[in-house]
Structures are given as C-alpha cells and as structure tokens.
Image (tube, rainbow, N blue to C red):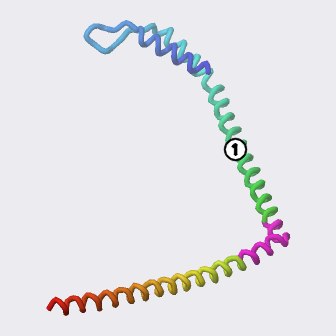
Amino acid sequence: MEVLSLLDELEDIIDKGGGLPFTSKALFDKEELLDIVKEIKLKLPDEVKQAKWVKEERQRILLDAQKEAADIVKEAESRIISMIDEHEITRKACEQKEAIIESANSMAQEISQGTKEYADEILARIEEVLVANLEVIQNNRRELK
C-alpha cells in the first residue's frame, strides 16, 4: 500500500527533524510535510475502498463456504439415515447384539453362582480343619492342666 510507504516517509522526516535545544520541539520543512499529507489524503480513499471490498468479498466467500459445508453435512446425514433404515444388516445386527447381551448376562450369573458355591466349599473345608485343630488344641490344654 502506498499510504504505508508515505507514512513511513513522514515518520523518517519527523525522526530526522532538528530539535530545539532544551525542548521537545523540532523544526521541519512545512512544505515537505504538507506534500506528503496531501498524497496520503489522495491515496487513502482508493486504498480504503479496496480494503473494504476485500473484506466484503472475504465475508461473502466464507458465508458461501459455510452454506455449502452445511448442505454437504445435511446430505450426508440424509444418506446415512436412509442407508440405516433400508438395510436388513442393521436390523439383524441389533437382534444379534441383544442375543449376545442376554447370553453374556446368563453366563455372568452362572459364573457368579459357581464362584459362590466354590467359595462356600472352600470355607466349609477350612471350617472343618479349624474345628479339628480346635479340638486338638482343647485336648492338649486339658492334658496340660
């Protein structure tokens, strides 16, 4: 953009301007500065118009792309729904899933019951051993007395 280069030139002139001693003031060539400001004023409207057009065009393109993406998503969803509804495979898969779940639940109950029975048998054997050992201990204590 030419306006930016003109602003850079203006900044260089200000940076190089001779300062007045003991103040923050500086001396500049008034005509040179005014010429640059006039050029900026002339070029600025065109560049602002171009920037505005670019911004509007960008926004339009984004909106079009979003609309197209939404249309593609809707079409894909419609296709998926119709494919799911139309296919016998899906229905059979659901039936198989239910049968597998039912079978798994049944097996889980059987395993749980078997585990409880096994644990009960082990505990009964331990109890028998402990009772026998307790009798031996009680007999030994009686003999000691």
Indicate the position of residue 73 as horizontal and vertical percent values.
Answer: 75, 56
Callout 1: helix, strand or loop? helix
Q: In this rendering, would 108 be left or right of 145?
A: right
Indicate the position of residue 132 as horizontal and vertical percent values.
Answer: 34, 89
Nearer to us in this view, 36 or 121: 121
How many numbered callouts? 1
Q: Is residue 24 magenta?
A: no
Quadrant position of residue 126: bottom left
Indicate the position of residue 106 as horizontal and vertical percent values.
Answer: 64, 83
Label 1: which residue?
A: 62
Q: In this rendering, would 66 be left or right of 82?
A: left
Judged from this view, the residue extending furthest toward the front is: 143
Please determine whether, in this image, residue 138 is positioned above or below residue 19.
Answer: below
| Residue type for callout 1 | Leu
Position of the C terminus, as image quadrant, is bottom left
Nearer to us in this view, 121 or 132: 132
Magenta residue span: 81-97
Please determine whether, in this image, residue 79 is positioned above or below residue 143.
Answer: above
Position of the N terminus, as image quadrant, is top right
